[in-house]
Image (cartoon, rainbow, N blue to C red):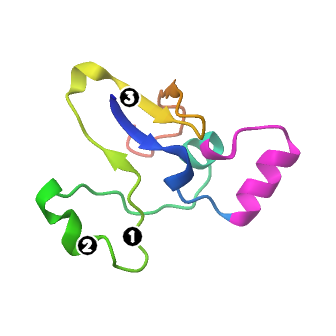
């Protein structure tokens, strides 16, 4: 596996999901790249996973590996989908 997240673990707003489906778009791609709704993304040491896994409001979406492996999203069929930044950056 590369630097990846499991598609079904990424939280997608109910309305975002419905509109994406209606427009025949991938809801996860829309959630990752569009809109003004932000959530805090952070990493933890693997050793700390057990301490945090039961906390409400935290979604564990994947793990980090070596940078050379690239970025990928693992879909519901366990296929890796390459990711690229498509969103707008307010810092540029």
The disc placed on residue 46 is: none
- Gap in angstroms between the C-alphas marked 2 and 3: 24 Å
Residue under numbered circle 3:
71
The residue carrying mark 2 is 52
Q: Nearer the viewer, mark 2 or mark 3?
A: 2
Query: Are the residues at dot 1 and dot 2 in contact (C-beta closer than 8 Å)?
Result: yes
Q: Tell which residue pokes out farthest to the front in this image.
A: 77
Mark 3 packing: few (<14 Cα in 10 Å), some, or many (20+)?
some
- The tag earlier along the polypeptide, 3 or 1, is 1
Which residue range is magenta in the image? 14-28
- Towards the viewer: 35 or 43: 43
- Specify which label sits upstream in the sequence, 2 or 3: 2
- Element class at badge 3: strand
At 60% from the left edge and 49% from the top edge, which residue is drawn? 31
In the image, residue 33 above or below residue 15: above
Examine the structure image and report whether residue 34 is included in the region drawn in magenta.
Answer: no
Q: Position of residue 21 (x, y in %)?
A: 81, 47
Label 1 Cα neighbours within 10 Å, binned few <14 / some 14-19 / many ≥20: few
Q: Can you see residue 45?
A: no
Nearest to the observer: residue 14 or residue 5: 5
Dot 1 corresponds to which residue? 58
The furthest residue to the top:
68
Locate the N terminus by quadrant. Answer: top left
Closer to us: 37 or 25 = 25
């Amino acid at each position: 596996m590369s630097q990846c997240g499991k598609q079904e673990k990424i939280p997608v707003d109910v309305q975002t999901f419905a509109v994406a489906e209606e427009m025949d778009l991938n809801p996860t791609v829309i959630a990752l790249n569009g809109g003004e709704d932000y959530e805090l993304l952070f990493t933890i040491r693997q050793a700390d996973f057990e301490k945090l896994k039961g906390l409400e409001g935290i979604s564990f979406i994947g793990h980090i590996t070596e940078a050379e492996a690239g970025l990928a999203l693992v879909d519901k069929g366990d296929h890796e989908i390459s990711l690229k930044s498509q969103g707008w950056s307010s810092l540029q």
